[in-house]
Image: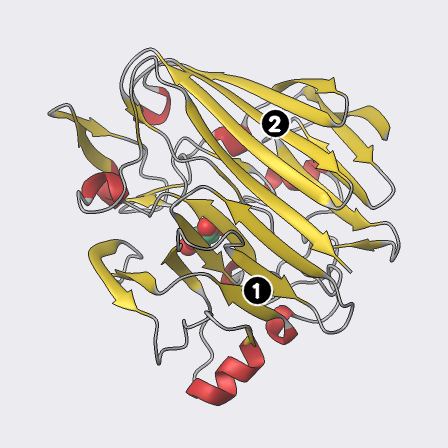
Amino acid sequence: MNIKNRQVFSTTLNEKVHIIEISNNFLTVEFSNYGAMITKLIINKHNLDLIVGCNSMEEYILQDKFFGATIGRYANRIEKGKFKLNSKEYEVSINEPPNHLHGGFNGFHKKLWSFEIENSSIIFSYFSKNMEEGFPGNLEIKVKYTLIENQLSIEYFGLSDEDTILNLTNHSYFNLNGEGVGDIKNHTIKIASEKYTEMNKNNIPNGNLIDVSNTPLDFQKPISIEEMFLKENILLDYDHNFLLKNSENIKASAYSPLTKIKLDLYTDYPCMQFFTASNLKDFKGKSNYSNFSAFCFEPQYAPNSINIKSFVQPILKKGKKYSHFIKYIFSL
Ligand code: BGC
């Protein structure tokens, strides 16, 4: 295990930002305390960075793609930024009109987190004050990343002094060909899901769950996006939320036939957003990107679930522990 910690000065924030690299024989992962984010993930054997992102910390701070960041308090959208909790109505930031997206204007992805390093883990902490971005409760958050051989796990912990809602995830953009190497349409995708959430034109689930069978969203058996295109005669810019099956341990996988790198995703969240980066069109980061330059697997509670009572509720009760995990296992 090797750990390097350096600081860079951000002129935008007028503060120093930490960049921490943890490596073992298999993986080298770079994190920053800005957004408690992942900025690089290198498979040592191939010297390949699988993380699509930016060249410098200043570029990370200036972009709006949520690259590699911890998303909170609420991953994805809340319709019109409104919800009711204990019969009280709350209004949170509307940063993607008419909705709330990914924690708001100044969500967790834009915070400078404190951190400590413990063996092969880095633990980021943040204290979110009552009514920050409109959310109730003083909330303590910890995000613990641990590297063990070919695994990177993320554990989320939260504690609030009032009932609140919480839906934390990680927004890493992966390309298993190596970032900047072609697009991810050649990746074989598998998602342990029989149903996805139907959405309105503002990307808000309307409460219906649709069977994936005979649709371009059926990834129950591994299939590449190119093959899906030929099969279904439609190339979707995927940005869909899948209900994950309890019965399977591996909730999603992606495989690049070019590098033979496979990513298996484990999580205890009920749903996952599968996103093929339609927002990266014409974006210049570490490389020149486009849509399909990356994919995101974002385990979470369903978008807008707080307003859809038939969905698993993202409610954190006062004094109760929030605990969820995401684990990525890489194999060659
Ligand atoms: C969402 C997209 C959104 C993107 C922003 C994804 O998690 O599902 O709808 O455009 O994040 O980076």
Residue 309 x/y as whole percent: 17, 42
Q: Which residue is rendered at x = 36% and y = 26% of the image?
A: 133
Q: Earlier in the sequence, mark 2 or mark 1?
A: 2
Packing grade of label 1 (10 A; few <14, some 14-19, many >=20) is: few
Relative height, residue 15 to residue 241 (above, below): above
Which residue is nearer to you in this view: 287 or 244? 244
Q: Which residue is label 2 attached to?
A: 144
In the image, taking residue 204 as reference, residue 235 lies left or right, namely right
> Can residue 120 be spotted in the picture?
yes
Residue 319 x/y as whole percent: 34, 12
Residue furthest to the left: 87
In the image, taking residue 8 as reference, residue 51 lies left or right, namely left
User: How many angstroms separate mark 2 from mark 1 (CA)?
Assistant: 32 Å
Residue furthest to the front: 247
In the image, taking residue 99 as reference, residue 224 lies left or right, namely right
Q: Please, what secondary structure does the residue beneath circle 1 have?
A: loop
Relative height, residue 130 to residue 249 (above, below): above
Q: Please, what secondary structure does the residue beneath circle 2 have?
A: strand
Which residue is nearer to you in this view: 52 or 281? 52
Residue 307 x/y as whole percent: 20, 41
Q: Which residue is label 1 attached to?
A: 281
Relative height, residue 26 to residue 225 (above, below): above
Q: Which residue is rendered at x = 32% and y = 47% of the image?
A: 303
Q: Which of labels 2 and 1 is toward the front?
A: 2
Q: Which residue is rendered at x = 41% and y = 34% of the image?
A: 103
Quadrant where the C terminus sits is bottom right
Residue 26 x/y as whole percent: 83, 46
